[in-house]
Image: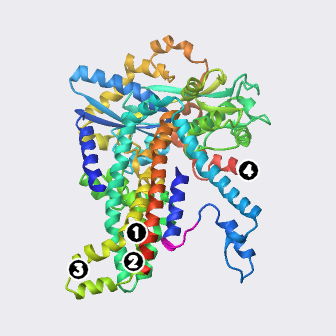
C-alpha cells in the first residue's frame, strides 16, 4: 500500500510546488488577523507585481501573539512579524533577530492600524452594560482571556486599569477595581478567539471584553440580532505593531520585499483594507471616510498611562506581578 | 478526534499485552462484577444469567457506545453536510485543505515506513535474543505511550529549535527541521513508534525461535530466514501494528501542533486545520476535514476487526 501511496504523494507535492512565485514571504501574525491579511496580501501582491513585474506569495501563520513570538525565537522563518503588542516583538528583538530600534523604523510606532477594547453583549443588553463600572457589579459575568498567554487579554486588563486610574485617581484604587472585575470572570481562556467562542457559541457570560475588530467579526458571523457592541466612553488605544525580522530577511535575501510589504500598510489602499476589516485606520483622511463605522471613544495610550510595554509587562504580568496578586485572592 | 485516537490506542495496548483475549471495550466492568457474583465452582458461562440481567448489561453497553461513539460521529457528518454536498466538497477542494491532506499523507507515509523497519528490528531483537538491558529496552519502547504528546513536541523544540541544543549548527547550515516537514515527521515518529513493536513482540515471543533455527540449520542465510520464515509468520501482526500506527500518525494533534509553526497551506496537518477552521467560524469546512479523519477511524476499525480475526485464526492453526 505504501509503495502505491508514495509516488502519488510525491506527484501531488511536485504539482503543488510547480506554481511557486518569484519571491515568498512568511508573515507570522496573531489570531484575529487572518481575514485582514488575506485581503492585504492579495492587494499587495497585485501592487508589487505591477511595480516590479515580480510575483510574490505571502504565507500566513496565526496563533496566540506570545506563542507566535516564541516560535519565531525558536526558528520559525518569519520574514515579517505582525503581532498583537510591542512587547512580543521586543521579545524577538531581545534574541537579536530584530534590531532593537524596530519601532522607530516605520511611522506611528510601527503600528499601521489600531484597535481598541469594546464590550460585546447579548441582544437587548439585558444587564444594561454601558461603561466599565457596570462590569464589577455583582451578578455580571465577564468573559476575557488569560493575560498571561493572550495579547488581547493584556489590552483588556490595561484598558480596565487605565479607566479606573483616571476615574479614581490612585494605583491602589485601580488595583481594587481590576481585582473586582476579575472576580466576575468565570473562566480564563488562553486566547482571544477562545474567549469569543466561549461567549458566542457556548453562551457563557453576560459581556465579552474584545478587540473591536473581533467584536465586529463575531457580529458579522452570527448576526446583529444576537449580539450588540457597546463602546465604553473611554478605552485604550491598542497598537498592534509590525516589523521585518532582520535576521531571517537578510539570510533569505527578502529584505526589499519585506520592507515594501510593511510600507504598503501606510498607503491609501492599505489603510482602506484595514478600515474595511474593522481595524481603525491611521490616515486622517481615510479615518474620516470611515468615521461612521467606529464608535467615538476617548482613547488613552499605553505610553501615557503605563510608561510603555516593558514597564507594564514587568509590573502587571510578570511572575508575581499585580495580576498574579489579584487573581490569587 | 482525540477521543477516536484515544480509543484506538487504548485498545491497541490491551491487544498488545493480551493478544488472544477478546476484550470488550464497551462494558468490561459490569461483566467482571457478574463474573465475581458467581460461586467459584460454577462454570463461567454468562448464559446462565437470568434474562433481565443480560438485558440490562447489553442495554448499558449499547447506550454507552451510542453516546460516546455513535453520537459524536453522527454530529461530525451532520455538521459537515449541513450546508449541502456542494459546500462539503468545496471545503475539501480549498487549497489549504488539499495541502493539509497531502501533508498528512506524506507524514503518515514517512512515519509508518520508518516505524515498520524500526518496529520489526526492535521486536526481533527483543523476542529472539537474550541480552542485558532487554527489560530497559522494552520500557523505552513504551515511553511514548506514557508521555504527554505536548511534551513529545517540546522535546524536539529543545533539541532543534534555534535556541536549542543543535540550533546554532542547524541555523548556520541552513537546515530546517523545526516548523517544517522533518520536524512534523520526527514528532509523529516519536509518538507512533510503539505501535508496530508492541504488536509484534508478544507474537514473536510466542512463536519462539525453533523455525528460524531449523531454517538456518538447513543452510538458509539470515535474510532468507527472515523473508521466508519470520515474515510470513508475523505478517498479520505486522499489518495490525502498521494500521494502528497509521491511524495515530494521521490523527496526532498535540505533538505536531508544537512543532508545526502553523504556516497556512504548508505545515498544517488535517487535525490542526480542523481546529483552525473551527476557530475561524468555518464550521462546514472544519467538520468536512474532521469527517475525513472520522472515516479513517471507521476504516481502521473495520480493517482492525478483520486483522484480529486473521490473527486468531493464525494462532489456532499454529496450535494444531
Residue A205 image offset from top left, x and y in percent: 70, 36
Is B131 colored magenta in this rendering?
no
Q: What span is in magenta?
A: B16-23
- Spatial CA distance of label 2 from label 1 is 9 Å
Locate residue B66, reporting x and y percent.
63, 50
Quarter where residue A11 is shown = top left
Q: Mark on residue B222?
A: 3
Q: Are the numbered discs 2 and 1 placed on the same chain, yes or no? A: yes
Under tag 3, what secondary structure? helix
Chain at numbered mark 3: B
Tell me the residue that label 2 is attached to.
B204
The residue indicated by pointer 1 is B237
Disc number placed over residue A314 in the picture, else none: none
The residue to which callout 4 is attached is A329
Q: Residue at x 48, y 42 (%)?
A: B291
Q: State whether discs 4 and 3 lie on one chain.
A: no
Pointers 1 and 3 in contact (C-beta within 8 Å): no
Task: Say left or right for B262 vs A299.
Answer: left
Depth check: B292 or B228 in front?
B228
**Across the whole image, how many numbered discs are drawn on residues?**
4
Residue density around tag 1, few if under 14, some if 14–19, many if 20 or more, within 10 Å: many
Label 4 chain ID? A
**Are both tags, 4 and 2, on one chain?**
no
Secondary structure of residue under mark 1: helix
| A72, above or below B306, in the image | above
Amino acid at each position: 500500500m505504501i509503495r502505491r501511496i508514495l509516488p502519488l504523494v510525491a506527484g501531488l507535492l511536485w504539482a503543488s510546488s510547480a506554481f511557486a512565485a518569484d519571491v515568498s514571504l512568511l508573515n507570522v501574525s496573531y489570531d484575529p488577523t487572518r481575514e485582514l491579511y488575506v485581503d492585504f496580501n492579495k492587494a499587495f501582491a497585485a501592487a508589487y507585481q505591477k511595480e516590479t513585474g515580480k510575483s510574490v506569495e505571502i504565507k500566513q501563520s496565526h496563533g496566540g501573539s506570545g506563542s507566535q513570538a516564541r516560535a519565531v525565537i525558536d526558528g520559525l522563518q518569519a520574514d515579517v512579524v505582525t503581532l498583537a503588542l510591542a512587547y512580543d516583538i521586543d521579545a524577538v528583538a531581545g534574541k537579536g533577530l530584530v534590531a532593537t530600534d524596530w519601532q522607530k523604523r516605520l511611522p506611528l510606532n510601527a503600528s499601521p492600524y489600531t484597535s481598541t477594547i469594546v464590550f460585546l453583549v447579548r441582544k437587548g443588553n439585558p444587564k444594561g452594560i454601558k461603561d466599565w463600572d457596570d462590569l464589577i457589579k455583582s451578578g455580571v459575568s465577564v468573559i476575557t482571556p488569560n493575560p498571561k498567554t493572550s495579547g488581547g487579554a493584556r489590552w483588556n486588563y490595561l484598558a480596565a486599569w487605565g479607566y479606573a486610574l483616571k476615574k479614581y485617581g490612585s494605583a491602589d484604587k485601580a488595583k481594587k477595581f481590576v481585582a473586582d472585575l476579575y472576580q466576575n470572570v468565570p473562566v480564563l481562556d488562553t486566547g482571544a478567539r477562545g474567549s469569543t467562542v466561549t461567549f458566542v457559541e457556548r453562551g457563557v457570560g453576560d459581556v465579552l471584553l474584545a478587540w473591536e475588530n473581533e467584536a465586529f467579526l463575531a457580529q458579522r458571523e452570527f448576526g446583529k440580532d444576537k449580539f450588540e457592541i457597546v463602546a465604553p466612553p473611554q478605552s485604550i488605544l491598542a497598537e498592534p505593531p509590525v516589523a521585518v525580522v532582520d535576521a531571517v530577511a537578510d539570510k533569505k535575501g527578502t529584505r526589499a520585499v519585506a520592507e515594501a510589504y510593511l510600507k504598503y500598510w501606510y498607503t491609501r489602499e492599505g489603510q482602506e483594507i484595514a478600515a474595511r476589516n474593522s481595524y481603525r485606520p491611521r490616515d486622517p483622511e481615510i479615518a474620516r471616510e470611515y468615521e461612521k463605522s467606529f464608535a467615538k471613544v476617548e482613547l488613552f495610550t499605553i505610553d501615557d498611562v503605563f510608561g510603555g510595554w516593558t514597564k507594564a509587562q514587568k509590573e502587571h504580568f510578570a511572575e508575581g506581578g499585580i495580576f498574579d496578586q489579584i487573581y490569587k485572592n | 478526534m482525540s477521543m477516536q485516537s484515544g480509543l484506538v490506542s487504548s485498545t491497541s495496548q490491551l491487544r498488545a499485552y493480551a493478544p488472544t483475549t477478546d476484550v470488550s471495550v464497551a462494558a468490561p466492568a459490569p461483566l467482571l462484577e457478574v463474573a465475581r457474583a458467581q460461586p467459584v465452582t460454577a462454570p463461567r458461562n454468562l448464559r446462565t444469567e437470568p434474562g433481565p440481567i443480560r438485558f440490562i448489561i447489553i442495554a448499558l453497553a449499547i447506550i454507552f457506545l451510542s453516546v460516546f461513539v455513535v453520537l459524536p460521529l453522527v454530529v461530525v457528518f451532520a455538521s459537515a453536510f449541513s450546508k449541502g454536498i456542494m459546500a462539503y466538497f468545496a471545503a475539501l477542494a480549498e487549497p489549504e485543505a488539499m495541502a493539509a491532506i497531502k501533508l498528512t499523507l506524506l507524514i503518515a507515509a514517512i512515519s509508518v515506513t520508518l516505524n515498520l523497519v524500526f518496529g520489526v528490528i526492535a521486536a526481533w531483537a527483543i523476542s529472539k535474543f537474550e541480552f542485558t538491558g532487554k527489560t530497559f529496552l522494552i520500557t523505552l519502547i513504551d515511553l511514548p505511550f506514557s508521555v504527554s504528546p505536548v511534551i513529545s513536541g517540546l522535546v524536539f523544540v529543545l533539541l532543534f529549535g534555534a535556541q536549542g541544543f543543535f540550533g546554532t549548527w542547524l541555523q548556520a547550515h541552513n537546515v530546517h527541521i523545526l516548523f517544517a516537514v522533518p520536524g512534523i515527521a520526527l514528532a509523529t515518529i516519536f509518538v507512533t513508534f510503539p505501535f508496530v513493536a508492541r504488536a509484534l513482540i508478544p507474537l514473536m515471543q510466542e512463536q519462539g525461535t525453533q523455525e528460524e533455527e531449523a531454517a538456518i540449520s538447513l543452510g538458509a542465510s539470515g535474510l532468507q530466514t527472515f523473508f521466508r520464515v519470520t515474515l510470513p509468520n508475523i505478517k498479520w501482526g505486522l499489518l495490525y501494528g502498521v494500521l494502528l500506527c497509521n491511524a495515530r500518525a494521521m490523527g496526532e494533534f498535540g505533538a505536531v501542533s508544537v512543532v508545526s509553526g502553523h504556516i497556512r497551506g504548508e505545515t498544517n496537518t488535517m487535525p490542526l486545520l480542523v481546529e483552525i477552521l473551527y476557530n475561524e467560524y468555518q464550521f462546514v469546512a472544519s467538520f468536512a476535514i474532521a469527517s475525513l479523519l472520522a472515516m479513517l477511524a471507521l476504516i481502521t476499525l473495520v480493517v482492525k476487526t478483520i486483522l484480529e480475526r486473521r490473527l486468531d485464526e493464525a494462532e489456532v492453526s499454529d496450535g494444531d
